[in-house]
Image (cartoon, coloured by chain):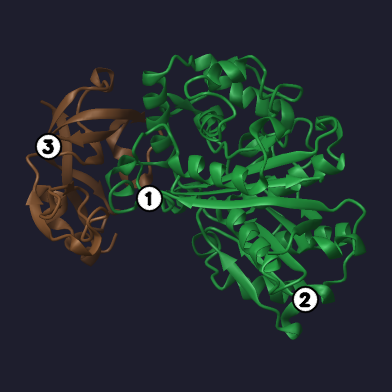
Amino acid sequence: MRDVAVIGVGCTTFGEKWHSSFRDLFVEAGALALEDAQLSGEKIDAMYVGNMSAGRFIEQEHIGALIADYAGMATRHIPSTRVEAACASGGLAFRQAVIAVASGMEDIVVAAGVEKMTDVEPGATTDALAGAADREWEGFVGATFPGLYAMIARDYMHKYSMTREQLAQVAVKNHYNGARNPIAQYQQEITIETVLKSTMVADPLRLFDCSPITDGAAAVILAPFERAREFTDTPIRVLATAQASDSIALHDRRDISTLDATVAAGKRAFKMAKLTHKEINMVEVHDCFSIAEICAIEDLGFCKKGTAGKFTADGETAIGGKIPVNTSGGLKACGHPVGATGIKQVCEIVQQLRGEAGKRQIDGAKTGMTHNVGGTGATVAVHILGRI
Amino acid sequence: MTVARFWRKIPQRYNLIGTMCQTCKRHFFPPRTFCPDCRREGRIVDHKFIGKGTVVTFTIIQTAPDQFASHGPYVLAIIKLDEGPQMTSQVVCDPSEAKIGMRVKSIFRRIATDGESGIIHYGTKFAPE
């Protein structure tokens, strides 16, 4: 296997982008990534695109070809593949691109993610997202996504002594980081009271425990590490790529508040990178709900099961803490265009490792991890990147 | 959900007909046609569940999907059936009564309506035992 480097990243701003179409979004992200890599489009050998539900959101399938076409690749006939794993679509697209370069099959590969979620009614968006869980045996009886994560939260709070305030601190910290990220959907700081006074969605989760509906796209460009310096002075090495699966329905899990797919993918990634937890300088985790970040940092092994609430309240996951989590603002504040999220996480780590993260910069960062979840934990992708 | 898709699962949805593997005696609800433990050695047959169990975790859905909106807030739970498997369903009770460890029994209820002209979905909910 060849070593793989990220040589360029690009991300649109995230938000309710009424003026931008699905096509506008991915073309913008792709152009930014190419410019960042100082690369001409003619050099691209293949594309992988993470997208969850264009069929439901804009009634468009065949996304691989559409993206290649509007990226100006139609006459070059490059292979372009859509990858789908609900909210983990972006993470899997990145992994497929890494595998393509590592195998020697392709040299210059684009991994992108895009989601246009605001062209349908909010009810239709929520219904499409419910397809990430088990439609026959969860959605049919009235399970919503916040509802499923609320059941994780209640199980967790029953087993461990996390307070509601500690859980709220996840959103407070992510909004603090989002306020320092120019692409974030929400760039306002909030307080614990903001979370505790917001509308109840699915008890115990309130509106400010939930990530929003977002439009956005992100793209990264990969190359064999040995060729990376043709394009950039700061190539970022892909140290590990890992993926795991679990039961589609939450009720079939071994433990409701442990994502075993996160545990498995995390272990595989650490083993592949030959790194320990102390050697990871930051992590972007999949905080689709506040409880999801609590479970993620435990299941990845950054703190013991049952202690992440206190760990968060003590500031250990903030910028300057033991392990900064979601410096981008996470899904909560940066926004969650589902197919783009996994790629945006990679963009954030790359910017941090290059020292280009501005007001949210982690000083001297050498390594970073991404953690992208599909559904309630049926798919997990974990990657480790390094300036090594 | 189309008529055929709903109709196909009527025995399972109305009467809690799941499956079991005769090789290892493991029970499955929702039903599976392939035993993950015995794999090709497994022999799957239908199994009617008694319909009693315990609440493992729950939530109170305040913001409901359109087809459930007329319900008002409702209790959604993961229930561990006495035969072993866990399933997701609603518990018909005052939301303030719901708690982890609560014993429940199955009841036949309307689940949702598919718009004004669509079919009415019936199925299994649970109530305090």
Q: Do the residues under discs 3 and 2 have CB atoms within 8 angstroms?
A: no
Percent position of residue B23, x then y: 13, 55
Quadrant into which the N terminus of chain B falls: bottom left
Q: Which mark is residue A232?
A: none
Decide: few, some or many residues near mark 2? Use Cα within 10 Å; few <14, some 14-19, many ≥20. some
The amino acid type, in three-letter code, at marker 3 is Ser
Identify the colour of chain B in the image.
brown
How far apart, in angstroms, are the residues tagged by discs 3 and 2?
58 Å
Q: Which residue is mark 1?
A: A248
Residue A118 in view, yes or no: no
Residue A126 location (% of width, % of height): 46, 47
A308 or B24, nearer to the observer: B24
Q: Nearer the viewer, residue A360 or B24?
A: B24
Subunit ID for the residue under disc 1: A
**Which chain is tinted green?**
A
Q: Position of residue B67 (x, y in %)?
A: 32, 47
Image quadrant occupied by the C terminus of chain B: top left
